[in-house]
């Protein structure tokens, strides 16, 4: 299958989600390897899932983990992409020739400064999420200045907004999230399925 825009699905915790998303032709699957995260899975679990899935690229989502820990895990496991949420760490990883995705969550006005700094640099992607709806106009004003990097939208990604997201710059794609499995092999997909189905390219 092909989708009408670039899609990354992060926080994959189970094989059901990974296979479901791969079946739709998503571009990237992310695994949260930060032990302090609610969506954490171990390296062994991530490797097991990756062994059963073909098609998407894989992202190690490290969050705010220290640079030394990230490089150790990455050198041992060699994920195609690494994702972090600290620009200093991102720049160090880039200097070590890793393919770096930066995730920036906008919660305060100071985060807008971080976003402005990030879009002036060259990363593989910048994923922009938002916990403060009142700052969305400021986010979009910041992004309108142009970016050296592909921008991925991770806020207000709703079924009714998809055509607008695809057709209107500056975003090159969207990020969705996986969810926990009720029991192995049993899942309800609902919104994730609706969005992916709406993005399918008709033959």
Image: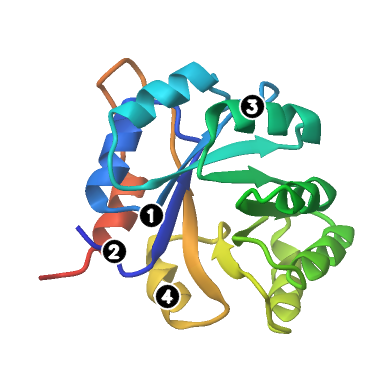
Identify the secondary structure beneath mark 1: loop
Identify the secondary structure beneath mark 3: helix
Q: Residues within 10 Å of mark 3 (few under 14, many from 20)?
A: some
Identify the secondary structure beneath mark 4: helix
Q: Are marks 2 and 4 in contact (CB under 8 Å)?
A: no
Marks 1 and 4 sit apart, C-alpha to C-alpha, by: 15 Å
Q: Residues within 10 Å of mark 2 (few under 14, many from 20)?
A: some
Q: Which mark is residue 27?
A: 1
The numbered mark, 2 or 3, whose residue comes first in the sequence reads: 2
Query: Where is the N terminus found, in terms of image quarters?
Result: bottom left
Q: Residue at x 29, y 64 (%)?
A: 3
Marks 1 and 2 sit apart, C-alpha to C-alpha, by: 9 Å
Q: Residue at x 25, y 51 (%)?
A: 24
x%, y% of residue 94?
72, 53
Identify the secondary structure beneath mark 2: loop
Q: Residues within 10 Å of mark 1 (few under 14, many from 20)?
A: some
x%, y% of residue 116?
80, 70
Q: Is residue 66 visible?
A: no
Q: Nearer the viewer, mark 3 or mark 4?
A: 3
Marks 3 and 1 sit apart, C-alpha to C-alpha, by: 23 Å
Q: Residue at x 35, y 47 (%)?
A: 56
Q: Which residue is mark 2?
A: 3
Q: Which mark is residue 73?
A: 3
Q: Are marks 1 and 2 in contact (CB under 8 Å)?
A: yes
């Amino acid at each position: 299958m092909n989708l009408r825009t670039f899609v990354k699905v992060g926080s994959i915790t189970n094989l059901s989600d990974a296979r479901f998303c791969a079946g739709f032709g998503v571009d990237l699957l992310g695994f949260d390897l930060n032990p302090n995260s609610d969506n954490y899975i171990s390296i062994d679990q991530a490797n097991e899932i990756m062994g059963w899935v073909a098609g998407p690229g894989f992202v190690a989502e490290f969050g705010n983990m220290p640079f030394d820990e990230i490089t150790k895990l990455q050198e041992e496991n060699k994920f195609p992409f690494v994702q972090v949420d600290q620009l200093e760490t991102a720049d160090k990883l880039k200097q070590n020739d890793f393919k770096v995705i930066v995730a920036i969550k906008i919660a305060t006005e100071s985060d807008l400064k971080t976003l402005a700094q990030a879009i002036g640099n060259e990363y593989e992607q910048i994923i922009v999420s938002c916990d403060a709806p009142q700052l969305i106009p400021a986010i979009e004003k910041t992004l309108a200045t142009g970016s050296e990097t592909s921008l991925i939208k991770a806020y207000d990604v709703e079924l009714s907004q998809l055509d607008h997201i695809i057709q209107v710059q500056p975003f090159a794609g969207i990020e969705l999230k996986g969810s926990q499995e009720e029991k192995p092999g049993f899942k309800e997909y609902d919104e994730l399925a609706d969005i992916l189905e709406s993005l399918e390219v008709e033959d």
